[in-house]
Amino acid sequence: MISLLCYALYPNVCFHVSKRKLLTTEGKEALIHKNSVNCGREIPIFPSPFFVFTEKVIKKKLQIKFDK
């Protein structure tokens, strides 16, 4: 199932660097959107550093929003 999601959403894959920082497949830095389900008060420890996302939001910096 995980590989199917990655294949279907391939250009929308990123790598978690630290706190809210991510690296996209284009090599650009991005932030996890503050309203995202993956962004909370505490810094979570993710089981994998790779994320698949559905939407990019461009404000001052590129932000990535994850759906519920």
Image (cartoon, rainbow, N blue to C red):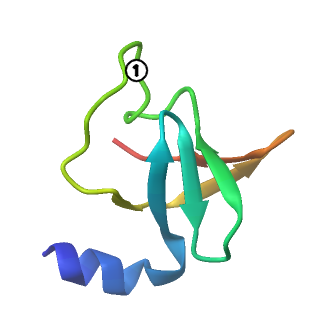
Above or below, 30 against 12 in this view is above
Number of labels in the image equals 1
19 lies left or right of 1: right
Above or below, 18 against 8 in this view is above
Residue depicted at x 68% and y 56%: 29
38 lies left or right of 60: left
26 lies left or right of 19: right
Q: Most extreme residue toward the top, as rendered? A: 41
Above or below, 39 against 17 in this view is above
**Percent x, y for residue 34?**
56, 27
**Percent x, y for residue 62?**
74, 50
Residue depicted at x 53% and y 27%: 35
The image quarter containing residue 6 is: bottom left
The image quarter containing residue 25 is: bottom right
**Percent x, y for residue 19?**
48, 33
24 lies left or right of 66: right
Above or below, 16 against 28 in this view is above
**Percent x, y for residue 63?**
66, 45
Residue depicted at x 18% and y 49%: 47
Q: Which of 19 and 11 is in front in this view?
A: 19
Residue position marked by numbered label 1 in the rendering: 40
Q: Nearer the viewer, residue 13 or 55?
A: 13
Q: Nearer the viewer, residue 17 or 4?
A: 17
> Judging from the image, what secondary structure is the residue with disc 1 in?
loop
Q: How crowded is mark 1: few (under 14 residues within 10 Å), some or many (20 or more)?
A: few
Amino acid type indicated by mark 1: Gly
Q: Most extreme residue toward the bottom, as rendered? A: 7
Residue depicted at x 58% and y 36%: 33
